[in-house]
Amino acid sequence: MKIERLWGSRLKESPDEAFIEFISGRDVRERPPCDAVLVPYDIWGSRAHAVMLWKQGIVPTEDAQKIISGLHDVTSLYQQGAFPLDPAKEDVHTNIESFLIEKYGLGVGGKLHTARSRNDQVTLDMTLFLRDRNLDFCRHLIALETSLLAGATAYAAVLIPGYTHHQHAMVTTFGHILLSYAESFYRDLLRFRQWHSLFNANPLGGAASYGTSLPIDRELTSLLLGFEKPSVSSLDLITNRWEAEAELSHAISIMMNHLSGLAQTLILFTTTEFGFVTLSDKYCGGSSIMPQKRNPSGLEVIKAKTAVAHGVQSSLYALGKSLFVGYNRDSQWTKYLIMDLIHECEEAPHIMAAILDTLSIDRERAHDLCRTGFITATDLMEAIVNDYSLPLRQAKMLIERAVKYSEQKNTDTITWEGLKQALEEMGLALALTADSVINHQDPATVVSRRKAIGGPTSDVLLKAVDAVTARVREQSEWLQDKTARLDSAQARLDDLEKDLLSHKA
């Protein structure tokens, strides 16, 4: 008998494999060295740099042709898993340059490093890596927004209790809850977009921090690497090789806070005590000893990863607080921190979207809870204010007394008798009836009355869904534009390489 996991036999569906990987973390999986992740970016930067050196007449055609061919050989080996980094060569930059020198000799391979330093090289590699991951977070958030907005539409009229202080507050709808998170994640999307506008600048050409006397063309390398522009200062981005990482960690941390809050909300909604949300078996864990368990493990892991994000953000701020002008080796550790953070958090929006897409609501249970805990007391108070022009403060005192007297009769809603006793005590004569008191506390009726912008009434909610959908669509179009810009940069580089390789020495 083959056993893969110590739980799951009671589940009707097998757990999703991406979910299992998400909740198991690093327990049985290795992570590649950080510089192994940077190989494609170092090659991209080196190709653009080599072409620019050739175009500027700094490196002869024949040498540039060999360098480009050698870089493509590295790409091929890397894609086959046959380009392991040699620790004796210290970093990705030295490994690649050393490959070229060993293949073509120092007279050719040694020319690739002309007019650049590992300082601007690693800053470039990290910027390219972070830009890609930043755009990936945008993609994941747009997909999550799609799930939330679809849920907000599907559950626009599904009544559930709303809470403050973990206690019954007012009746709302599950759609209203999901739309609120869609608003939160939309702001997250804007933060990632802001990161792109702040840091999509080319550091290549800064060399050791103070520029180079060689006649390089930074505009060309910016074009070939998909940057908006070269950095204005050769010094700034190299000195501040922590800021892009910290800014991205900030966006990730706030996103994770929103995910963690949604996770905790869903966890409580799935408990026996609340019991009106059920997660799909595909996104539940189990117990090695308790056969009945269906644990919200993915949601718990999201909360754990949020704590990790907070720690990384604090460390990045600390690393950047006292860097002397110019490159500092301290900043090497920002690479490890931000890569760990991205690895921990990049799948969280996807997992949450999958959980939302597959959960189910026990509408009867939710509706039953909408008749307990005096949850409609506020709505009865507002109805009295509206119908009888009673000052709100006076109406609140009235309903507080009505709750007290009704509670003494072991009920969960205000009774006509309890309200009548409160009216008499306060000396008020209002034309209320037993039927009107019941009607003013009907869960569907009270929700239908909250028609102001932002409220849970179905018509209002669906208009809000349309508005947020339009805003998300705009961000999706922005993302498509930025992706197309990167594709165009790669195509330009390919074309220039073809020109180079077909050029006669």
Image: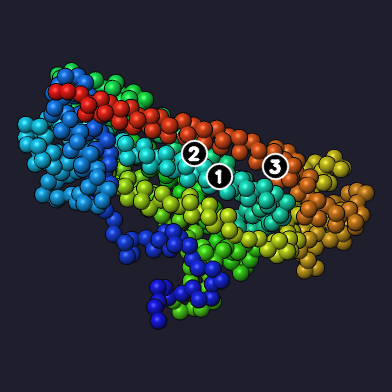
Question: Residue 38's image quarter?
Answer: top left
Residues at marks 1 and 2 touching, judged by CB atoms closer than 8 Å: yes
Q: Which mark is residue 189?
A: 2
Quarter that holds the N terminus: bottom left
Residue type at mark 2 is Leu
Are the residues flagged by discs 3 and 2 in contact, CB closer than 8 Å?
no
Label 2: element kind: helix
Neighbours of disc 1 within 10 Å: few (<14), some (14-19), many (20+)? many
Vertical arrangement, residue 373 with respect to residue 258, above or below: below
State how far apart marks 1 and 2 are (Cα).
Answer: 10 Å
Task: Pick whichever, 88 or 323, lies toward us.
Answer: 88
Residue 145 bears which disc, if any? 1
* Residue 111 at x, y percent in the picture: 12, 30
In-front residue for pair 421/184: 184
Q: Is residue 368 above or below residue 428?
A: below
Q: Which mark is residue 462?
A: 3
* Relative to 76, 226 lies left or right: right
Looking at the image, residue 465 sits to the left or right of residue 438; the answer is left
| Residue 23 showing in the rendered view | no
Relative side of 404 to 427, left or right: left
